Amino acid sequence: MRKSLQLQAEMTEEFGTCVLDVTLDCEDGAPVGGEAEHAAMVVALAMLASEKARIAVRVHAVNHPAFESDMAIIAGKLAHKITHIMVPKVESVDDVIKAEQALLAASADHLPLHVLIESPAAVHRAFEIAAHPRVQSLSFGLMDFVSAHGGAIPVDGMGSRGQFTHPLVVRAKLEIASSCHAHGKVPSHCVVTEFNDTAALTAAARRAARELGYTRMWSIHPKQIRPILEAFAPTEGEIEDAAKIIASAAHADWALISFDGKLHDRASYRYFWQVIERAHQTGRALPADAQGYFQTVVQ
């Protein structure tokens, strides 16, 4: 966790903006019987982070004995330090409501929830879960999802290739992405466990971004971060065209324009503005006429 926070600080300095979140883990990271002590350690680490850091915490699932303690410690002491709380193994809106109630009890009612969808039943309810106003993002928990099928999905469904070819896994990914876009939430793609295989990671990230509609992706190793950023970033040509189109549209007071022989209106303006936003979020260089969109005013 310390290394992750240090890497985040270094990359924020390099890119001029925070290009990755760090999620401190209380679920798999805590030893059995030592959950409260682990949560206290997470609080101490988060408090030492800089003001520019984007930190989240994954707590235990809502049906775990340590859930309420996690929420009281994490949300109660870090409410104004973290960006969100990640709740694993969410099965229904009832789980989201329980997590929301825990936030309210900890006087952290402003904090959003990110949830992990990790079972067939949760996938079935993804649209309902994504619609809840407290939910900001849905992530796909690949390995738990495969395991939940009792051996019906072979082990290669967890791998970098099988997760893009097995119909049940692909269907789950599409449902999650679609539910997020239907309700204006962020779909976050699952991990690639082959962390030493850069080619496999890059291919998976590109497919997640270009084919399945995901706008974020989890990494489990520092080597994975830059390939993910590259795969999810627009190309230089896309950024240049988007900047020109938005500038021309603004000059025309958002009326119709022609660009490279193609008609553009407000529907496509929204798309090209999103390209510029994605470029900024992934630390890409912006053309001079687009840099002012993201300048911070200091008083």
Image (cartoon, rainbow, N blue to C red):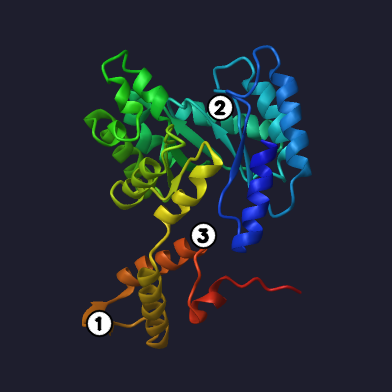
- Which mark is nearer the camera, 3 or 2? 3
Mark 3 or mark 2, which has the lower sequence index?
2
Give the residue drawn at x 39%, y 80%.
244
Residue picked out by circle 2: 98
Mark 3 and mark 2: Cα distance apart in space: 32 Å
The kind of residue on which mark 3 rests is: Gln
Say which element carries label 2. Answer: helix
Relative vertical location of residue 204 with respect to residue 125 in this rendering, above or below? below
Left or right: 194 in relation to 82:
left
Q: Is mark 3 on a helix, strand or loop?
A: helix
* For discs 2 and 1, the disc positioned in front in the rendered view: 1
Residue 94 relative to residue 210: left or right:
right
Give percent across and percent down for residue 199: 37, 44
Q: Are marks 3 and 1 in contact (CB under 8 Å)?
A: no
Residue 228 position in % (x across, y down): 45, 49
Does the residue at mark 2 contact the one at mark 1 (Cβ under 8 Å)?
no
Residue 187 in the image: x percent, y percent?
A: 41, 44
From the image, tell me which residue sits under label 1: 260
- From the viewer's perspective, is 45 left or right of 208? right
Residue 281, which numbered label?
A: 3
Q: Nearer the viewer, residue 198 or 108?
A: 198
Q: Which class describes the residues within 10 Å of circle 1: few (<14), some (14-19), or many (20+)?
A: few
Residue type at the position of mark 2: Lys
Residue 80 against residue 39 in the figure, above or below:
below
